[in-house]
Amino acid sequence: MESYVERPPRPALSGVVRTAWVLRAGEAPYVQRNLPTGGVEIHLPIGGRPQLVGPLTGPDVEVVPARTTVVGVRYHPGTPPRLPTTLDDLVDQRVDLADLWGGSVDELIDRTALAPTPEHALRLLEDRLLGDLRTFRPDPLVGAAVAALMPWRPVTVDAVAGHLALSPSQLRRRCLRALGLSPKVLQRTLRFQGFLALAQAGAVATGRRGADGMAGIAVDTGYADQAHLGRECVRLTGLTPRRLLGGSADRCACDHEHAASYGPFLAARRRTPLLA
């Protein structure tokens, strides 16, 4: 039987990694729909070739072979692993990690293949990522832009640029290098992640503008209305909200626990007053 389990990363990685996870395919191949998150991911099939999934602007659908276990990590926007290129070269791409890290990947493959459990293999991957932290130098202005563009905040990209003493074109160039995405695309992606966070948590809409159910959650997340959410959902995932969430009108029914991924979004919502 297929299973997917998330957990927070080890504390030393929490500033750069958003989520660590283990996916097990059952007796049949499993179709995994990877969604845009604003960050990159590393996918390591135990016994197979690890890949870096670049910043996504739409769905990335992969078929995980039967009886395959994959461990992986999902990075925060603007905090990628050590790479020999900028992220604007990797948008919507899957790249063999060896093409980016060289021969050291072979040792990682061998060690994780011999790991006694998937969790142990995941910890070996995290051990490898800890080495990147010694030389990691994120762009602080891009980090500030990411924080400002999180959901629940009614802010324009031009306003964020002005707050950071940058022109909109300067902010765009810096974001494309560090994120692979323009500030506007990042804002749309984070807004949709905020919607997923509310749906996963089964949050109750605040009732603003008389809306409830999915319409209310759409408004709470920053969409103009439910139709606006529907268009963005299809653009980013290839599915309508109802199909994406497993048939439920206002909460996810996928049976996966995503608290590690969406906790930060819900925490940001609690810190930011909702608009009247």
Image: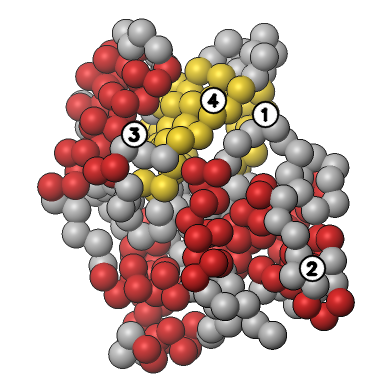
**Residue 240's x, y, as percent?**
80, 52
Q: How many numbered marks does the figure carry? A: 4
SS at mark 3 in the image: helix
**Gap between marks 1 and 4, in whole Å?**
11 Å
Q: Disc 4 residue type? A: Leu
Task: Residue 185: tell me if it is visible.
Answer: no
SS at mark 4 in the image: strand
Q: Disc 2 residue type? A: Gly
**Gap between marks 1 and 2, in whole Å?**
30 Å
The residue nearer to you, when weighing 13 against 128, is: 13
The residue wearing badge 3 is: 97
- Mark sitting earlier along the chain (2/4): 4
**In this rendering, which labeled residue sits more in front, label 1 or label 4?**
4
Neighbourhood count class around disc 1 (C-alpha, 10 Å): few under 14, some 14–19, many 20 upward: few
**Residue 109 lies in what quarter of the image?**
top left
The residue nearer to you, when weighing 14 against 124, is: 14
Q: Disc 1 residue type? A: Val
Q: Is residue 216 above or below residue 89?
A: below
Residue sitting at 66 percent across and 23 percent down?
Answer: 30
The residue wearing badge 4 is: 23
Q: Is residue 170 above or below residue 246?
A: below
- Mark sitting earlier along the chain (1/2): 1
* Residue situated furthest left in the rendering: 134
